[in-house]
Amino acid sequence: MELQDYWVILRKRWLSIGVFTLLGAGLAVAASLATTPLYEASTQLYVSVKTGDSSSDLLQGSNFTRQQVTSYTQLVNSPLVLQPVIEDLGLEARTSALSSRVSASSPLNTSLINVTVTDENPAIAAATADAIAKQFKTVIADLETPTDGGASAVKISIVRDAVAPEGPASPNLKLNLALGLLVGLALGVGVAVLRAVLDTRVRSDADVARVTDTSVIGVIPNDDDAPEHPLIVQSSPHSQRSEAFRRLRTNLQFLDIADRPQSIVVTSSLPGEGKSTTSINVAITLADAGTRVALIDADLRRPSVAKYMGLEGSVGLTTVLIGRANVEDVIQPWGNGFLHVLPAGQVPPNPSELLGSLAMARLLEKLTEMYDVVIVDTAPLLPVTDAAILSKLTGGALLVVGADKLHRNQLAESVGALETVGARILGIVVNRQRRTQSDQYAYYDYTPTPATSADSGRTSRKKRKNPSTGRLPQVPESTSPTAVSGPTTLWPGDSLSETQLKDFQRQQAQNAPQHQRPNS
């Protein structure tokens, strides 16, 4: 992972990181409030040695004192010092318990000893520290007394008495809060990075590039209303999702111009990735561009094309394959006449055998001669082998990948299944990709404004003039309602007159593809 990847993770997971940080701070505050306050009281001792008046004697005494101080600090926690203190103060504690609350230290290169006592009661802490200092003096005097009974050369002086503290030494709320914030932040970042590393879902075209070198020829943005409006190109032609399908159409039209496929299988790895809606919308966009398109519902297990497009689906592909009808009898026109749909028909008991039969191959050959493009919607790759069989019979396969639904290992398995049978993978379409405001170009919108309506068009027409003559453009009207007028002069946004609308519809009817159908 690069530095940019970590920044993307932090930007994407900032909410969970913030939750962990606040949780760490909350736990630190709760622990501090639940902890019993402890108070510290300290006393300070000075160690000196009685020596001669010469400088050498003073130097030797100073060196001796510094060496002995290290040993004296170890004696402060000894039972020899603490047991008499417990008896004098009447403490209900053992020597080991009191020793854990007593500490002694000596600053570097000094003859001072600092004795600190911690207790829940500040007064007891101060009294205990003073009692330890007095008992320590007695113990050292006894230990340093010469064997001949003379006076001890070591002198212990109390230079600072213990004072009952006003505030607790622990817990330190500010310190604990800072530590809690740091720990929570580190834990949040760690969890976010771990989730990103362990997350194998395909969420964008970058994730596809990690699995295969196959080009991503289309990215369809997510739309929460897509299940309710599957024919988005028809229901909302100016939406971002519709424009994405038109970009996919353009990429398909310029795909391998030298060997452009006339038949395309549209499939996915798993159910629910949007292969059927992709097939339908791509077919509609191709037909809108004047391409003669045949859409075949070859998903003989869960057919859905007829339901989405509002067509009769009781007869269709299976009826043709078993020889009970000709394709011209069951294929149905849809839309502007350039799109014809062949439903799946009845669900057979042997879908794979029917799709891999000679009859299916001959049907595809016949339809490719009748139409410019044949789009075949088929079953997913991983559950069944129908798509792999059809991919070999057609010009190639278009693999639809559902963002946030498919894992990278599943995508690799699907690509491997197509490559195993020698199928040609035309490209990958990432469907339902979610984009946030931080994504580049995520919210670019270029939908028509209300100025393109008929009323505003008539209003704006009054203000527009011919750039060459300075006059308003004249729209010729035909004298006969049945005559087809020539090219009309219209400004963008102007509405057709009733006569021009009839002329346009008649031109469309004359240019519509003619199919051979038996006379009824």
Image (cartoon, helix red, strand yellow):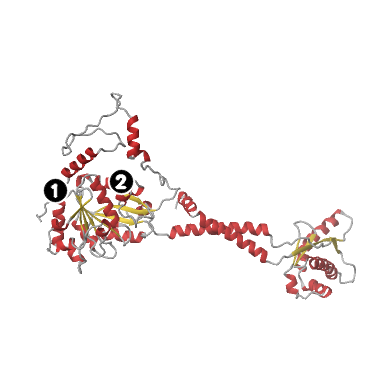
- Decide which of tag 1 and tag 2 comes sooner along the chain: 2
Residue 239 position, x and y percent, is 35, 47
Residue depicted at x 75% and y 58%: 107
Kindly state the secondary structure of the residue where label 1 is placed: loop
Residue under numbered circle 2: 247
Kindly state the secondary structure of the residue where label 2 is placed: helix
Please give the label number shown on residue 225.
none
Residue 123 position, x and y percent, is 81, 66
- Please say if 458 is above or below 121: above
Type of amino acid at the residue the image marks with label 2: Arg
For the C terminus, the quadrant is bottom left
Residue 445 visible in the current orientation: yes
Q: Nearer the viewer, mark 1 or mark 2?
A: 1
Q: Nearer the viewer, residue 476 or 296?
A: 476
Is residue 279 rendered to the left or right of residue 365?
Answer: right
**Within-10-Å neighbours for mark 2: few <14, some 14–19, many 20+:** some
Residue under numbered circle 1: 514
Is residue 514 rendered to the left or right of residue 74?
Answer: left
Type of amino acid at the residue the image marks with label 1: Gln
Residue 200 position, x and y percent, is 40, 59
